[in-house]
Amino acid sequence: MPAIGTLTELLHHYLTAHQKDQAVGWGEGDGRTRWLSTAELADRIRALSLALHNHGVKPGDRVVLFAENRWEWMVADFAILTAGAANVPIHPGLSASQVAYILKDSGACLALVSSNELLATFMEARRQGGDVEQVISFDDPPAADPDVMPLRHALEIGRAWGDSNPGLYRNTRDNVSPGDLASLIYTSGTTGDPKGVMLTHHNLASNVSACSSVFDFRADDQALSFLPLCHVFERTVDYCYYFSGAAVIHVSDLAGLDTAFTRFRPTVFAAVPRVYEKLYARILESVPPNRQGLFRWASELALRLAARKAASRGLGPWLALQRALADRLVYSRIRARMGGRLRFCNSGGAPLSADLAGFLLGAEIHVLEGYGLTETSPVIATNRYADPRPGTVGRALPGVEISIAADGEILTRGPHVMSGYWNAPDKTHDIIDSDGWLHTGDIGSLDSDGYLSVTDRKKEILVTAQGKNVAPQPLENALKRMPLISQAAIIGDRRPYLVALVAPDFDMLRRIAGKLGLEEMPLRRQLDHEAVQAAVAEEIATATESFAHHEQVRRFHLLEREFDPDQDELTPTLKLKRRVILQHFADIIEDLYSGHEAPHVLGS
């Protein structure tokens, strides 16, 4: 692989060294697969980059990209970068008020938006603030608007602008420097407003180079890209695909992932643990009663096989025979559900359980779990194909340093570390010390072979099973502003969705109970009464209306008491002690996730 210092150099290498007819694809509704060649991609990227220039975008400007995972995202990203601007990706699940904050804080001058649904959200956000004058819509807008231009028109303008200004695109592209800002990615903060992570071309290009040196991505690979590209995990992995010349198929709807596996038959992909958990759950559901014993035997065998592989131990003839039998009866059928051609896949964004990782490895599904942060471009460490260790996140990438602080916090240093937080030097100094070490906020350990294990979270940001970051305090503060709610604890780390433990305002509860004639009922029956549950559900829905989809509370439990500092559930300043609360209310939390609690489900 050639050395690259910028993402524009990566693009040039991809388009010149890996010319092919089927470069980027997507599925049509009629079952067909549509492809763009590298030549068609080059034309669209150049035309859109010139259209941005025509609309006044200058090197150093910030351009918003508000879209789901689709081929236009890739074209728009490279168009922004080759124009010398920085991409400000926004998650498609954010509310108008959250988008408005990013518009104002980033100072973005132009936006690219995908669907009409997102366009409506964006236009509402623009009305709330921000200086974005021009919007380019991937889909044709529903009504004529001088501020909204369809992508097809922008491409026409860009081509014409290029004819009038020969050499402009190449000059602008080639003037991009490694230290230039490539992306401004907003992540959830613990005190409300998100922080803009500044990633330079050097940050991202170094991470792509390091990942490509340890993962065997190839030009004949067919990669499936389905995680949100606004998250740096899928985006960096996709850059690796382009760097290697792989064909990339984009899937925007995760609901159709099962079909996508069998339809496109990928050889590589990246996913968050929840995808693997759902795959395993569907496998379990499909096992008929008369084969349950066989599946249990194959599952136990898979863990033994994985342990042997991790320890670099051979199988011996008897274990090899068992593996061959299990493969024919069980493992091969699981691999067929993933298309039957998978060489390996990556996992990140949240911890993958060691048992699930071991089962998949034993079934010859090589899930290479890694670890990183948005602030680290993102990969810090990862398992390798030749020597994985389930239960760890592998070893440091080349050029990346890892250290464990005295209190167990994981520190990292190297070219992957962000240049800082946008407009927030104080917050930058809080996370990057004077020696260049970034403090991850996670607790972990390194074994004698350099394998990193992440054991706990020092910071309070929750990471759901889908890999979504959620800051619990803004949600809890919003809930506590409701009349019926005195205290609230948001739960959701490594879980499929958020739930809440809610301590009601007992004075307000008594008044409601009196109006309903419930005052003679035991407290538990009052709390479980349909009218009380409905009233609290309505308040939760109102309080969280402006939060993103993944920040919505799905279930709740009304507690019979408030959190108590005498039981070590609160600090002296009345802050929640989350670990203690998780321990004290463990049974209730498990019931919430098993469906045995909270008749009111507050979302989907």
Image: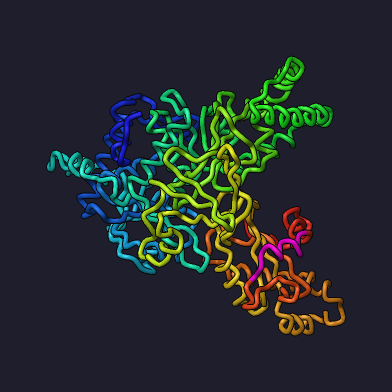
When asked about the image quadrant of residue 530, the answer is: bottom right
Q: Where is residue 551 in the image (x, y as percent from the top left)?
A: 57, 60
Report the number of discs: 0
**Quadrant showing the N terminus:** top left
Q: Position of residue 330 (x, y in %)?
A: 72, 25
Q: Give the residue displayed 58% in from the left and 62% down from the top.
A: 460
Q: Where is residue 207 in the image (x, y as percent from the top left)?
A: 41, 41
Res. 119 visible in picture = no
Q: Is residue 578 magenta?
A: yes
In the image, 113 versus 65, the foreground residue is 65
Q: From which residue to which does the magenta span run?
A: 576-586
Colour basis? rainbow
In the image, 481 versus 428, the foreground residue is 428
Q: Give the residue displayed 25% in from the left and 41% down from the top.
A: 47
Q: Is 424 left or right of 282, judged from the image as shown?
A: left
Q: Give the residue displayed 55% in from the left and 29% down from the top.
A: 385
Instruction: Answer above or below: position of 164 versus 602.
Output: above
Magenta stretch: dominant secondary structure: helix
Q: Where is residue 502 in the image (x, y as percent from the top left)?
A: 70, 70
Q: Is 588 left or right of 365, judged from the image as shown?
A: right
Q: Give the residue displayed 28% in from the left and 34% down from the top.
A: 12
When asked about the image quadrant of residue 288, the answer is: top right
Instruction: Answer above or below: position of 414 versus 493.
Output: above
Res. 61 visible in picture = yes
When asked about the image quadrant of residue 533, the answer is: bottom right
Q: Is 451 left or right of 324, judged from the image as shown?
A: left
**Quadrant showing the C terminus:** bottom right
